[in-house]
Amino acid sequence: MSQWDMNNDIERVLYSEDDIAEAAKRVGTELAADYEGRTPVIISVLKGAVLWTVDVMRYMQYAEVEFIDVSSYHGGIASSGEVDLIVDLQTDIAGRDVIIMEDIVDTGRSLKFMMALLEQRGAKSIKVASLLDKKEGRVVDANVDYVGFDVPKAFVVGYGLDYKQLYRNLPYVGVLKQAVYDPEHADLVDTTDITPEH
Ligand SMILES: O=P(O)(O)OC[C@H]1O[C@H](OP(=O)(O)OP(=O)(O)O)[C@H](O)[C@@H]1O
Ligand SMILES: Nc1nc2[nH]cnc2c(=O)[nH]1
């Protein structure tokens, strides 16, 4: 492995590229069956859910896709507790069946915020399809209807999920080495391979 290699920053792989492809097929096929005869609006949550959205929607039939961006992390590994609407939808979803596509539901704050927004705008139905469900992270009530994987409580990156905007393009989901986000504890892990400042 060269030193300029993102894989060096990963403690362990949780879900491989093949595992994720299988989950996308399973969830997409289930959505196709559940929405037969209807044309839902898929609401993909920027930026993390983009890869999951395109992989799942390949298995669906008639569906529109829209994007929204809400943020509560502001670059760190802990939720700030405050959710901001960064990019709004470009379409009216009143009376529509919507499917929120998330990469991860953790504290549930982002999802709760979006559910309230879409309800207020008159969505006919709202379901949630998330690659990862970190149930142990919940701080507020938030339910995921279609789950790729139940993920343990660790900070994960890859396949859309970032740390400081990096690692989204890893094809798998893995746990980030602690030394990457917490240099004070760099002595706890082997730092020889860790990518320097970006
Ligand atoms: O359940 P929560 O604790 O609210 O966390 C989940 C949210 O956090 C991530 O987004 P983030 O705000 O990091 O934006 P990003 O997708 O652009 O990285 C993820 O994509 C979810 O939207
Ligand atoms: N990258 C990343 N973003 C998150 N947002 C909420 N939980 C997580 C997580 O574990 N990893």
Image (cartoon, rainbow, N blue to C red):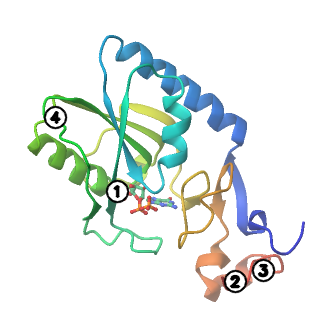
Q: Earlier in the sequence, mark 1 or mark 2?
A: 1
Q: Quadrant of residue 64?
A: top left
Residue marked by disc 3: 191
* Distance CA(mark 4)–CA(mark 3): 49 Å
Disc 1 residue type?
Answer: Thr
* Distance CA(mark 3)–CA(mark 2): 6 Å
Residue 139 in view (yes/no): no
Q: Residues within 10 Å of mark 1 (few under 14, many from 20)?
A: many
Disc 2 residue type?
Answer: Ala
Query: Circles 2 and 4: CB distance less than 8 Å?
Result: no
Residue marked by disc 1: 107
Query: Circles 3 and 2: CB distance less than 8 Å?
Result: yes
Q: Quadrant of the N terminus?
A: bottom right
Residue that extends furthest to the front in the rendered view of this protein: 90
Name the spot of residue 41 as percent of width and height, x first: 31, 33
Q: Is residue 68 left or right of residue 119?
A: right
Residue marked by disc 4: 123
Residue that extends furthest to the bottom in the rendered view of this protein: 184
Residue marked by disc 2: 186
Name the spot of residue 118 as percent of width and height, x first: 18, 43
Name the spot of residue 154 as percent of width and height, x first: 54, 59
Query: Circles 1 and 4: CB distance less than 8 Å?
Result: no
